[in-house]
Structures are given as structure tokens and as C-alpha cells.
Amino acid sequence: MTPEKTVARLSLYRRFLKIAKEDGVDNVYSHQLAEMVRSTPAQVRRDLMILGYNGSPQKGYDVAELIKHIDTFFNTEKIIDVILVGVGNIGRALLSYFRDGKSHIKIIASFDKDETKAGRVINNSRCYAMDDLKNIVAENNVKTAILSVPATDAQSIADILVENGIRGILNFAPTRLKVPSDVFVEDVDITMNMEKVIYFSAGKKK
Amino acid sequence: MTPEKTVARLSLYRRFLKIAKEDGVDNVYSHQLAEMVRSTPAQVRRDLMILGYNGSPQKGYDVAELIKHIDTFFNTEKIIDVILVGVGNIGRALLSYFRDGKSHIKIIASFDKDETKAGRVINNSRCYAMDDLKNIVAENNVKTAILSVPATDAQSIADILVENGIRGILNFAPTRLKVPSDVFVEDVDITMNMEKVIYFSAGKKK
DNA sequence: TTCACACTGTGAATTTTGTAACAAAATACT
DNA sequence: AGTATTTTGTTACAAAATTCACAGTGTGAA
């Protein structure tokens, strides 16, 4: 399977390729792509190898074509439906983030333990009670969830998600979730990231 | 300098150690720490080596002592002041995130281009106009910033930050910032993370 | 006091990730 | 057509991160 780092970079390449396309750019060279994502030409070419799409010397890569191949790689010609659990501050921010960004990722429903939120439409997404999760996930064949609940609830909700067939979780709670090995969890750990910044910026002398 | 990955994990260890301490745990073994942060005992021991603090074979690591050493490593006996620029959805979520979590990181001021937000207190943090940034950063000797503005504004605001002495940026905008090499940038790229989850969870068969 | 035990600290092996180098391909120029 | 130029695809190499494996150590039971 493709290494995690490469997958991450492919996602970036595509984003910047789309911007370039908007700007009317038809083809790019590896060194241009490298500059966009702060990488090196060698790294870019190496990453693109796995797509099975070949650029041409002289003209580099055809932007539209390359995007198409990355789309195929990610299997996202179609819209991907995801759910979000935990409509607190971060949850709401994410709802608007994915609504505004015209990406192929769509939050089809959000859920919250707080029953008073159920039924309300928050940031364009209808909020449901936790009890409805089972049906909505099943009916829409949702496989991916965003978890933005407080740390104290994260594990128990993750259990519910897994139980109902969720296979991938983007976790914003500052906890390490225990899930079966066939479930993929990506942690977005803001405190940790912040501490990294503080540590390394202190090291960088003026 | 300590590798980035190690720094990230040290931050995690500390968080979980603090929780353990709250729970009245006095000492931990590497395999327990490993389980907490989803790692391996060997990895934990290797990471802790750089602290210069030694556990003992029988009792493992003294929790309080280990926390103290990680604190020293991060140089955070004192509170770290940071600023936040961009009081939109994500900005507000972060304000409340850092207000609620009783961490040693404190957002002392927030800024927004939108002058109508200036003067208002949003999520316990006073919002200032961009023009005030210079003075507040200088007066408080702030070295770290959270950037949560739209992608289109990110670079120009980053330039302002750098100009005013900011040396570390936690960037939530889906852009790669161009900064001098003595400034550290950590990107939190939610779309990319989401795509990783989708990719790898699809690979994981039921 | 010796033995067995459970764990640490750390060099060495392994795996993963990134970089460099260069032949082959496509174009433009003469 | 032949040559120079530019950039790719890929292989070989290097560096970094992780894991292994085991000697060393303190403790308590026999």
C-alpha cells in the first residue's frame, strides 16, 4: 500500500493543481509542483510514479490529466459522504469549513448528544440525535466520520461509530482512541501541534 | 536538534502523564505509556532517552518526575503567550479550545481584518484591529501565532506576522506559506487529513 | 545469598523515507 | 537529419526513524 506520506502529498498536489487550472495553467513541471507544496522535484516525480500516469519531457504534466489521475487514485470521482459527531465549537467550524470549500467531501448529517440540538439545522447541516445515527449511516452507506466531541466522550462515541460500520475517523479529541485494527484513525491534535510550534520557533534564532 | 516526531510524542506523553497523575498513578512503565499514545515500548524508551532522565527497572518512570523533565524540555514552566489572527469559525473554535483546556498556552489577543469585530470580546479574548498587532506583539514579546484566516489572506497576513517578530506559526489555512527559514510553520490541513482517512479506511476491508 | 523476574537503556539491524544521478524521451534549432 | 536542451522515470544511494535484542539492574522470594 502506498505510504502515508505519499498519500498526504498527493492530496496536496491535487489541491494546488486545481488552483493552477483555475488560473488557466495547462501543464506543470515537477519543480513547479515542488515549489507549490514546499517539496523537491525529485520527491514530486517519485510520488507521481505510483499514479501510473506519465508526464512528458518538455511539457511536464498535463494539469487536467494529472488531476484526473489523482482523483482516480483517491477514488473520488464521486462525492464522499461523511458524518460529523459533536456539534460544539469545533464541530460547527468544520461544518462551515466543508460547506464553503467546494470539495468532494460532504457532511450529510451531524449528530450531538445534546437532544436540544436535534432537528435544528446548524451550518446547513441537519443535526440529529445519536439514536438516529445507526439508520442514517446504514441508509447512506457512510464509512467515514469526523469526531469533534469532548475528550471525555470520544471513546464511547468512537465505539458506537465502529459498531455501526464506520471504518475511518478523523479525530479532533485530544485522546487516543482504541479501535479495531481494521479501522483507520487520524488524529488532529491541536495542542500537540501548538507545542511543536512553540518548541521549534524558540530554537530558531532571530 | 531533536527530531520533529519525537517532540510531537513528548508532548503527548506529557498530556497522558498528567491525566495519569490526576488518577493517582505514581509510576508508569514504557509499555503503559506506549499503550496510552498508541506506540511501542521501545519507541517510548528511545524518546525518553533524550530527556536525560532515567527510570528504574522495577518501578518504571516516576510520573511526577517525568512530567517535570518534559516541562523542562519544552521550557514551559511558565505560560506561553500567543496571538490568533482570523476570528472566523475556526478562529472562534480555537479561542474556546484554548480557553477551556487548562493548558499553559494562552491566547492573549485576537485580531481580525474586519474592523467591526475590533473591540469586541469574543470567547473571552479581546479582538483587535490589525493595526494594533504591532504594538501588542512587541509589548508582550509574543513569538508565536495561530493563523486562521481564509486561504486568500494567509500569505499577506503571514508576512505581517513575520515582519513583527513572530517566529512560529500554526497555520490552518489550506496554503503553503512562504516564510524566511528562521520561521517555523506547522500546517494543520484538515482537507488533507480527511482525504487520508478516506483513502486508508477504504483500503481496510471489513 | 543466590536465583528468577520484570523492566530499563542502548548499540545494531531493519524499515521507511527522501535525495541524487542519469539514461531515455520529446522538442526546438540549425 | 543531426545536435543541443530540458525534463521525465527510475534506479541506486543516503539519511532518518523505528524496532530488535540483549546486557545491566534492583527487588523479593526461596
Image (cartoon, coloured by chain):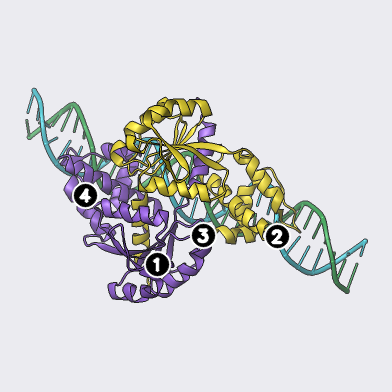
Chain colours: A purple, B yellow, C cyan, D green
**What's the distance in space between the residues labelled 3 and 2, CA to CA?**
19 Å
State the separation of the CA atoms marked 4 and 3. Answer: 40 Å
Q: Position of residue A125 (x, y in %)?
A: 29, 62
Q: State if disc 3 and disc 4 touch (CB < 8 Å).
A: no
- Residue A154 location in percent, x, y? 49, 64
Q: Which residue is mark 2?
A: B24
Which amino acid type is marked by label 3?
Answer: Ala
Q: Are marks 1 and 2 in contact (CB under 8 Å)?
A: no
Same-chain check, marks 4 and 3: yes
Instruction: Indicate the amino acid at tag 4.
Output: Leu
Q: Which residue is mark 3?
A: A151
The picture quadrant where one finds residue B110 is top left
**Marks 1 and 3, the one that precedes in the sequence:** 1
Disc 1/disc 2 C-alpha distance (Å): 36 Å
In the picture of the structure, the residue carrying the numbered disc 1 is A116
Q: Chain of mark 1?
A: A
The residue under the point 53% across, 62% down is: A152
Q: CA distance from mark 1 to mark 3?
A: 21 Å
Examine the rendered structure and indicate whether residue A64 appears above or below residue B112: below
Q: Which residue is mark 4?
A: A66
Q: Residues within 10 Å of mark 1 (few under 14, many from 20)?
A: few
| Viewer-side label of 1, 3 | 1
Q: Residue at 36% across / 68% down in the picture?
A: A118
How many C-alpha atoms fall within 10 Å of the one at disc 3: few (<14), some, or many (≥20)?
some
* Mark nearer the viewer, 1 or 2: 1
Q: Amino acid at mark 1?
A: Thr
Whether callout 1 and callout 2 share a subunit is answered no
On the rendered image, what quadrant is the N terminus of chain B found in?
Answer: top right
In which quarter of the view is residue A144 placed?
A: bottom left
Give residue C29's position: percent from left, percent from top. Answer: 10, 26
> Is residue A180 at all visible to an observer of this figure?
no
Q: CA distance from mark 4 to mark 2?
A: 55 Å
